[in-house]
Image: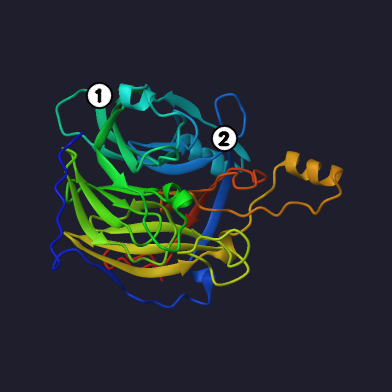
Amino acid sequence: MRFINLVFSIALTFFLYACSTTSPDLDKDINLVAETRLLDEKGVMLTQVSGLARVDDYIFVLAQDRNTLYFTHEKALSKSFESGVVEIRLMPLKLSASQALAKLPQASWEAITFAAIQGDNSSAQFDVYLSHEHDFEGDRHQLFHGILTIDNEKLSMSPLSSFGTGFAFLEHKSVPLKRTFNYGYEAISWQAAEQRLVALPELKSQPIYGVSRKGDVTILADAQHPLRASDMTPVSESCFLVTSNCFASSGFTDALCTSGEQRPKLSIASMQVQGQKIVLGDVLDVTPTLRFVEATPESIARATAESKPLPNPQFNMEGITAFKNGFLVVNDNIPRGNAKTMLRYIELPNLDKETCRIQ
Protein backbone atom coordinates (compact mmCIF):
# COMPACT_ATOMS: atom_id res chain seq x y z
CA MET A 1 0.00 0.00 0.00
CA ARG A 2 1.21 3.50 -0.85
CA PHE A 3 0.72 6.78 0.89
CA ILE A 4 -2.22 8.72 -0.54
CA ASN A 5 -1.77 12.37 -1.28
CA LEU A 6 -5.26 13.83 -1.70
CA VAL A 7 -5.38 17.27 -3.21
CA PHE A 8 -8.53 19.23 -2.44
CA SER A 9 -7.60 22.58 -4.01
CA ILE A 10 -10.86 24.27 -4.95
CA ALA A 11 -9.19 26.11 -7.79
CA LEU A 12 -7.91 22.92 -9.34
CA THR A 13 -10.43 20.18 -8.63
CA PHE A 14 -13.24 20.72 -11.07
CA PHE A 15 -14.93 18.99 -13.95
CA LEU A 16 -16.29 20.95 -16.89
CA TYR A 17 -19.04 19.55 -19.07
CA ALA A 18 -19.09 21.32 -22.41
CA CYS A 19 -22.61 20.69 -23.70
CA SER A 20 -22.77 19.62 -27.32
CA THR A 21 -25.64 18.46 -29.48
CA THR A 22 -25.73 14.95 -30.82
CA SER A 23 -25.68 14.90 -34.59
CA PRO A 24 -28.95 13.64 -36.14
CA ASP A 25 -26.98 12.26 -39.12
CA LEU A 26 -25.08 9.47 -37.42
CA ASP A 27 -23.87 7.89 -40.68
CA LYS A 28 -21.19 10.56 -40.97
CA ASP A 29 -20.09 10.24 -37.34
CA ILE A 30 -19.38 6.51 -37.01
CA ASN A 31 -18.72 3.61 -39.35
CA LEU A 32 -18.99 -0.06 -38.35
CA VAL A 33 -16.22 -1.59 -40.48
CA ALA A 34 -15.97 -5.20 -39.32
CA GLU A 35 -16.67 -7.54 -36.44
CA THR A 36 -15.69 -10.99 -35.19
CA ARG A 37 -16.71 -13.27 -32.32
CA LEU A 38 -14.20 -13.84 -29.50
CA LEU A 39 -13.25 -17.36 -28.42
CA ASP A 40 -10.89 -18.49 -25.68
CA GLU A 41 -7.95 -20.85 -26.27
CA LYS A 42 -10.29 -23.87 -26.14
CA GLY A 43 -12.63 -22.52 -28.80
CA VAL A 44 -15.35 -21.57 -26.31
CA MET A 45 -16.96 -18.14 -26.54
CA LEU A 46 -15.30 -15.70 -24.16
CA THR A 47 -17.79 -14.32 -21.62
CA GLN A 48 -18.11 -11.34 -19.30
CA VAL A 49 -15.56 -9.24 -21.20
CA SER A 50 -14.91 -6.02 -19.30
CA GLY A 51 -11.97 -4.25 -20.94
CA LEU A 52 -9.69 -3.80 -23.94
CA ALA A 53 -6.14 -2.51 -24.35
CA ARG A 54 -3.47 -2.41 -27.05
CA VAL A 55 0.31 -2.47 -26.56
CA ASP A 56 3.27 -3.31 -28.81
CA ASP A 57 1.13 -4.67 -31.68
CA TYR A 58 -0.94 -6.88 -29.36
CA ILE A 59 -4.61 -6.56 -28.46
CA PHE A 60 -5.53 -7.62 -24.92
CA VAL A 61 -9.02 -8.61 -23.76
CA LEU A 62 -9.95 -8.63 -20.08
CA ALA A 63 -12.64 -10.99 -18.76
CA GLN A 64 -14.26 -9.97 -15.50
CA ASP A 65 -14.46 -13.35 -13.82
CA ARG A 66 -11.18 -14.96 -14.95
CA ASN A 67 -7.67 -14.46 -13.61
CA THR A 68 -6.45 -14.56 -17.18
CA LEU A 69 -5.69 -12.03 -19.90
CA TYR A 70 -6.48 -12.99 -23.49
CA PHE A 71 -4.56 -11.62 -26.45
CA THR A 72 -3.96 -11.74 -30.18
CA HIS A 73 -1.51 -10.04 -32.52
CA GLU A 74 -2.76 -7.11 -34.58
CA LYS A 75 -1.77 -8.89 -37.80
CA ALA A 76 -3.95 -11.88 -36.94
CA LEU A 77 -6.89 -9.64 -36.11
CA SER A 78 -6.46 -7.57 -39.28
CA LYS A 79 -6.37 -10.75 -41.35
CA SER A 80 -9.51 -11.97 -39.61
CA PHE A 81 -11.37 -8.74 -40.40
CA GLU A 82 -10.14 -8.58 -44.01
CA SER A 83 -11.09 -12.18 -44.78
CA GLY A 84 -14.47 -11.97 -43.08
CA VAL A 85 -13.69 -14.67 -40.51
CA VAL A 86 -16.63 -14.81 -38.10
CA GLU A 87 -14.61 -15.74 -35.02
CA ILE A 88 -11.08 -15.53 -33.68
CA ARG A 89 -9.39 -17.67 -31.03
CA LEU A 90 -7.40 -15.77 -28.39
CA MET A 91 -4.35 -16.90 -26.45
CA PRO A 92 -4.31 -16.92 -22.62
CA LEU A 93 -1.87 -15.21 -20.26
CA LYS A 94 -2.42 -16.20 -16.65
CA LEU A 95 -2.48 -13.61 -13.86
CA SER A 96 -0.42 -15.13 -11.07
CA ALA A 97 -1.61 -14.50 -7.54
CA SER A 98 0.21 -12.39 -5.02
CA GLN A 99 -0.90 -12.66 -1.40
CA ALA A 100 -3.27 -9.73 -1.89
CA LEU A 101 -4.82 -11.22 -5.02
CA ALA A 102 -5.17 -14.64 -3.42
CA LYS A 103 -7.40 -13.14 -0.72
CA LEU A 104 -10.04 -12.09 -3.25
CA PRO A 105 -12.97 -14.55 -3.03
CA GLN A 106 -13.70 -14.14 -6.73
CA ALA A 107 -12.34 -12.22 -9.70
CA SER A 108 -14.09 -9.00 -10.68
CA TRP A 109 -11.70 -7.32 -13.13
CA GLU A 110 -13.05 -4.18 -14.79
CA ALA A 111 -10.30 -2.38 -16.71
CA ILE A 112 -6.73 -2.65 -17.99
CA THR A 113 -4.09 -0.25 -19.31
CA PHE A 114 -0.37 -0.38 -20.11
CA ALA A 115 2.57 2.02 -19.72
CA ALA A 116 5.95 1.66 -21.40
CA ILE A 117 8.94 1.11 -19.10
CA GLN A 118 12.00 3.13 -20.13
CA GLY A 119 15.25 1.18 -20.13
CA ASP A 120 17.90 -0.64 -22.14
CA ASN A 121 16.35 -4.09 -21.91
CA SER A 122 16.62 -6.27 -25.00
CA SER A 123 13.00 -7.28 -24.48
CA ALA A 124 10.04 -4.91 -24.32
CA GLN A 125 8.58 -4.35 -20.86
CA PHE A 126 5.40 -2.59 -19.84
CA ASP A 127 3.71 -1.69 -16.58
CA VAL A 128 0.28 -3.31 -16.43
CA TYR A 129 -2.47 -1.70 -14.35
CA LEU A 130 -5.76 -3.46 -13.63
CA SER A 131 -8.87 -2.17 -11.88
CA HIS A 132 -10.70 -4.64 -9.63
CA GLU A 133 -14.27 -3.96 -8.52
CA HIS A 134 -14.90 -5.29 -5.01
CA ASP A 135 -18.25 -7.03 -4.95
CA PHE A 136 -17.79 -8.53 -1.52
CA GLU A 137 -17.23 -7.40 2.05
CA GLY A 138 -15.11 -4.24 2.21
CA ASP A 139 -15.31 -0.63 1.15
CA ARG A 140 -12.65 -0.12 -1.53
CA HIS A 141 -12.10 -0.70 -5.23
CA GLN A 142 -8.49 -1.72 -5.79
CA LEU A 143 -5.82 -1.25 -8.45
CA PHE A 144 -3.29 -3.99 -9.17
CA HIS A 145 0.09 -3.75 -10.90
CA GLY A 146 2.30 -6.17 -12.79
CA ILE A 147 4.97 -6.14 -15.50
CA LEU A 148 4.44 -7.56 -18.98
CA THR A 149 7.52 -8.77 -20.86
CA ILE A 150 7.48 -9.39 -24.62
CA ASP A 151 10.59 -11.19 -25.87
CA ASN A 152 10.67 -12.59 -29.42
CA GLU A 153 6.86 -12.84 -29.46
CA LYS A 154 6.84 -14.68 -26.14
CA LEU A 155 4.70 -13.00 -23.50
CA SER A 156 5.09 -13.34 -19.74
CA MET A 157 3.58 -11.56 -16.74
CA SER A 158 5.06 -10.93 -13.30
CA PRO A 159 2.94 -11.65 -10.19
CA LEU A 160 0.39 -8.93 -9.52
CA SER A 161 0.49 -6.80 -6.38
CA SER A 162 -1.96 -4.28 -4.98
CA PHE A 163 -1.23 -0.73 -6.12
CA GLY A 164 -2.13 2.36 -4.09
CA THR A 165 -4.74 2.29 -1.36
CA GLY A 166 -7.79 1.91 -3.57
CA PHE A 167 -10.87 4.03 -4.21
CA ALA A 168 -13.89 4.39 -1.93
CA PHE A 169 -17.31 3.02 -2.83
CA LEU A 170 -19.94 5.28 -4.34
CA GLU A 171 -22.01 7.25 -1.84
CA HIS A 172 -25.20 8.76 -3.24
CA LYS A 173 -28.71 9.03 -1.85
CA SER A 174 -30.19 7.67 -5.10
CA VAL A 175 -28.15 4.46 -4.95
CA PRO A 176 -29.15 1.79 -2.39
CA LEU A 177 -26.36 0.95 0.03
CA LYS A 178 -26.43 -2.72 -0.99
CA ARG A 179 -25.55 -1.75 -4.58
CA THR A 180 -22.83 0.86 -4.00
CA PHE A 181 -20.07 -1.71 -4.53
CA ASN A 182 -21.32 -2.30 -8.09
CA TYR A 183 -20.07 1.06 -9.30
CA GLY A 184 -16.31 1.22 -9.48
CA TYR A 185 -13.61 2.42 -11.84
CA GLU A 186 -14.25 0.66 -15.13
CA ALA A 187 -12.38 3.28 -17.18
CA ILE A 188 -8.63 3.66 -16.59
CA SER A 189 -5.92 4.81 -18.98
CA TRP A 190 -2.25 5.72 -18.83
CA GLN A 191 -1.49 9.36 -19.68
CA ALA A 192 2.12 9.34 -20.87
CA ALA A 193 2.48 13.13 -21.00
CA GLU A 194 1.67 13.40 -17.29
CA GLN A 195 3.23 10.04 -16.33
CA ARG A 196 0.10 9.00 -14.45
CA LEU A 197 -2.87 6.71 -14.52
CA VAL A 198 -6.24 8.44 -15.01
CA ALA A 199 -9.14 6.64 -13.30
CA LEU A 200 -12.67 7.67 -14.30
CA PRO A 201 -15.60 6.47 -12.15
CA GLU A 202 -18.48 4.56 -13.70
CA LEU A 203 -21.02 7.10 -12.43
CA LYS A 204 -20.94 10.73 -11.37
CA SER A 205 -20.51 11.82 -7.73
CA GLN A 206 -17.18 10.00 -7.35
CA PRO A 207 -13.75 11.59 -7.81
CA ILE A 208 -11.65 11.30 -10.94
CA TYR A 209 -8.20 10.21 -9.79
CA GLY A 210 -4.66 10.53 -11.05
CA VAL A 211 -2.22 7.87 -9.82
CA SER A 212 1.57 8.18 -10.21
CA ARG A 213 3.94 5.30 -10.94
CA LYS A 214 4.73 5.27 -7.22
CA GLY A 215 1.07 4.76 -6.35
CA ASP A 216 0.47 8.28 -5.02
CA VAL A 217 -3.16 9.27 -5.59
CA THR A 218 -4.40 12.75 -6.46
CA ILE A 219 -8.00 13.85 -6.90
CA LEU A 220 -8.17 15.52 -10.31
CA ALA A 221 -11.84 16.46 -10.25
CA ASP A 222 -15.26 15.60 -8.89
CA ALA A 223 -16.95 13.71 -11.71
CA GLN A 224 -20.24 15.18 -12.87
CA HIS A 225 -20.36 13.45 -16.22
CA PRO A 226 -23.72 12.24 -17.62
CA LEU A 227 -22.30 8.83 -18.49
CA ARG A 228 -22.14 5.27 -17.26
CA ALA A 229 -18.46 5.02 -18.14
CA SER A 230 -17.30 1.52 -19.10
CA ASP A 231 -13.82 2.15 -20.58
CA MET A 232 -11.52 4.82 -21.99
CA THR A 233 -8.58 5.03 -24.39
CA PRO A 234 -6.10 7.79 -25.31
CA VAL A 235 -6.07 9.35 -28.79
CA SER A 236 -3.44 12.03 -28.07
CA GLU A 237 -1.43 13.37 -25.12
CA SER A 238 -4.48 15.05 -23.59
CA CYS A 239 -7.48 13.61 -25.44
CA PHE A 240 -9.34 10.44 -24.49
CA LEU A 241 -12.44 8.65 -25.74
CA VAL A 242 -14.86 7.24 -23.16
CA THR A 243 -17.52 4.59 -23.78
CA SER A 244 -20.87 4.64 -21.99
CA ASN A 245 -23.97 2.45 -21.80
CA CYS A 246 -26.96 3.97 -19.99
CA PHE A 247 -29.86 1.64 -19.32
CA ALA A 248 -33.37 2.27 -20.60
CA SER A 249 -35.65 4.37 -18.42
CA SER A 250 -37.83 1.39 -17.54
CA GLY A 251 -37.00 -1.98 -16.05
CA PHE A 252 -33.54 -2.32 -14.50
CA THR A 253 -32.01 1.16 -14.30
CA ASP A 254 -29.14 3.08 -12.78
CA ALA A 255 -30.47 6.01 -10.79
CA LEU A 256 -27.63 8.24 -11.99
CA CYS A 257 -27.65 7.27 -15.66
CA THR A 258 -30.73 6.48 -17.72
CA SER A 259 -31.27 7.01 -21.42
CA GLY A 260 -34.52 8.93 -21.00
CA GLU A 261 -36.08 6.52 -23.49
CA GLN A 262 -37.41 2.97 -23.65
CA ARG A 263 -34.09 1.74 -25.01
CA PRO A 264 -30.51 1.82 -23.73
CA LYS A 265 -28.20 4.56 -24.96
CA LEU A 266 -24.69 3.80 -26.19
CA SER A 267 -22.38 6.80 -26.30
CA ILE A 268 -18.78 7.65 -27.11
CA ALA A 269 -17.58 10.85 -25.43
CA SER A 270 -14.43 12.90 -25.92
CA MET A 271 -12.59 14.09 -22.81
CA GLN A 272 -9.62 16.43 -22.48
CA VAL A 273 -7.29 15.98 -19.49
CA GLN A 274 -4.67 18.69 -19.03
CA GLY A 275 -3.04 18.95 -15.62
CA GLN A 276 -5.99 19.02 -13.24
CA LYS A 277 -8.39 20.50 -15.75
CA ILE A 278 -10.81 17.99 -17.26
CA VAL A 279 -13.31 18.91 -19.97
CA LEU A 280 -15.95 16.54 -21.33
CA GLY A 281 -16.66 17.58 -24.91
CA ASP A 282 -18.77 15.81 -27.52
CA VAL A 283 -21.09 13.00 -26.47
CA LEU A 284 -21.91 11.00 -29.58
CA ASP A 285 -25.00 8.75 -29.56
CA VAL A 286 -23.92 5.59 -31.40
CA THR A 287 -26.98 3.54 -30.43
CA PRO A 288 -28.52 3.31 -33.93
CA THR A 289 -25.29 1.93 -35.41
CA LEU A 290 -24.07 -0.36 -32.62
CA ARG A 291 -27.13 -1.21 -30.52
CA PHE A 292 -27.92 -4.75 -31.61
CA VAL A 293 -25.72 -7.84 -31.56
CA GLU A 294 -26.35 -11.43 -32.64
CA ALA A 295 -27.90 -13.86 -30.19
CA THR A 296 -26.16 -17.12 -29.35
CA PRO A 297 -27.54 -20.30 -30.99
CA GLU A 298 -28.12 -21.72 -27.51
CA SER A 299 -30.35 -18.83 -26.46
CA ILE A 300 -32.33 -19.04 -29.70
CA ALA A 301 -32.84 -22.79 -29.26
CA ARG A 302 -33.88 -22.29 -25.64
CA ALA A 303 -36.42 -19.61 -26.55
CA THR A 304 -37.83 -21.77 -29.36
CA ALA A 305 -38.17 -24.80 -27.09
CA GLU A 306 -39.96 -22.73 -24.45
CA SER A 307 -42.18 -20.97 -27.03
CA LYS A 308 -40.82 -17.59 -25.96
CA PRO A 309 -39.92 -14.58 -28.14
CA LEU A 310 -36.51 -14.86 -29.75
CA PRO A 311 -33.79 -12.95 -27.88
CA ASN A 312 -32.80 -9.52 -29.16
CA PRO A 313 -29.59 -8.84 -27.25
CA GLN A 314 -27.97 -5.45 -26.87
CA PHE A 315 -24.34 -4.51 -27.52
CA ASN A 316 -23.16 -2.88 -24.28
CA MET A 317 -19.69 -1.61 -25.30
CA GLU A 318 -17.62 -2.72 -22.30
CA GLY A 319 -14.23 -1.85 -23.81
CA ILE A 320 -12.47 0.41 -26.32
CA THR A 321 -8.92 0.73 -27.66
CA ALA A 322 -7.22 2.32 -30.67
CA PHE A 323 -6.70 0.12 -33.74
CA LYS A 324 -5.39 1.06 -37.21
CA ASN A 325 -7.40 4.10 -38.37
CA GLY A 326 -10.14 3.66 -35.80
CA PHE A 327 -11.04 1.81 -32.63
CA LEU A 328 -12.03 -1.60 -31.35
CA VAL A 329 -15.10 -1.90 -29.12
CA VAL A 330 -16.38 -5.04 -27.41
CA ASN A 331 -19.48 -6.27 -25.57
CA ASP A 332 -20.01 -9.00 -23.02
CA ASN A 333 -22.74 -11.64 -23.00
CA ILE A 334 -24.31 -10.34 -19.79
CA PRO A 335 -26.78 -9.36 -18.32
CA ARG A 336 -29.06 -11.94 -19.91
CA GLY A 337 -26.30 -14.19 -21.21
CA ASN A 338 -27.80 -14.50 -24.68
CA ALA A 339 -25.49 -12.23 -26.72
CA LYS A 340 -22.50 -13.27 -28.76
CA THR A 341 -19.30 -11.63 -27.49
CA MET A 342 -18.30 -9.52 -30.48
CA LEU A 343 -15.21 -7.43 -31.16
CA ARG A 344 -16.09 -4.61 -33.53
CA TYR A 345 -13.84 -2.33 -35.56
CA ILE A 346 -15.29 1.16 -35.89
CA GLU A 347 -14.09 4.41 -37.43
CA LEU A 348 -14.94 7.96 -36.33
CA PRO A 349 -14.47 10.03 -39.52
CA ASN A 350 -14.80 13.38 -37.73
CA LEU A 351 -12.31 12.70 -34.93
CA ASP A 352 -9.93 15.64 -34.48
CA LYS A 353 -7.15 14.67 -32.09
CA GLU A 354 -5.95 18.24 -31.66
CA THR A 355 -9.29 19.72 -30.60
CA CYS A 356 -10.60 16.45 -29.11
CA ARG A 357 -13.83 16.71 -31.11
CA ILE A 358 -15.62 13.72 -32.60
CA GLN A 359 -18.53 15.33 -34.44
Instruction: Indicate left or right for 142 with 164 as reference.
Output: right
**In what element is the residue under mark 1?**
loop
Task: Residue at 14%, 55% (x, y): give it.
Answer: 7
Instruction: Indicate left or right for 236 with 291 as reference.
Output: left
Compared to 31, does 93 lie above or below? above
Alpha carbon separation for disc pair 2 and 1: 30 Å
Label 2 packing within 10 angstroms: few (<14), some (14-19), many (20+): many
Amino acid type, residue under disc 1 in the picture: Ser
**In what element is the residue under mark 2?**
loop
Residue 239, x across and y down, in percent: 28, 59
Compared to 24, does 327 lie above or below? above
Which of the two residues, 143 or 36, is positioned nearer the viewer here? Answer: 143
Looking at the rendered image, the quarter that the N terminus falls into is top left
Task: Residue at 66%, 52% (x, y): give it.
Answer: 313
Compared to 314, does 150 lie above or below? above
Looking at the rendered image, the quarter that the C terminus falls into is bottom left
Task: Residue at 25%, 52% (x, y): give it.
Answer: 209
Label 1 packing within 10 angstroms: few (<14), some (14-19), many (20+): few
User: On residue 76, which mark appears?
Assistant: none
Q: To which residue does mark 2 refer? A: 46
Indicate the colouring scheme: rainbow
Residue 204, x across and y down, in percent: 37, 62
Task: Let me know if residue 74 appears in the view.
Answer: no
Which of the two residues, 48 or 315, is positioned nearer the viewer here? Answer: 48
Q: To which residue does mark 1 refer? A: 123
Amino acid type, residue under disc 2 in the picture: Leu
Residue 337, x across and y down, in percent: 64, 43
> Is the C-beta separation of discs 2 and 1 under 8 Å?
no
Task: Residue at 26%, 28% (x, y): give it.
Answer: 124
Compared to 192, does 66 lie above or below? above
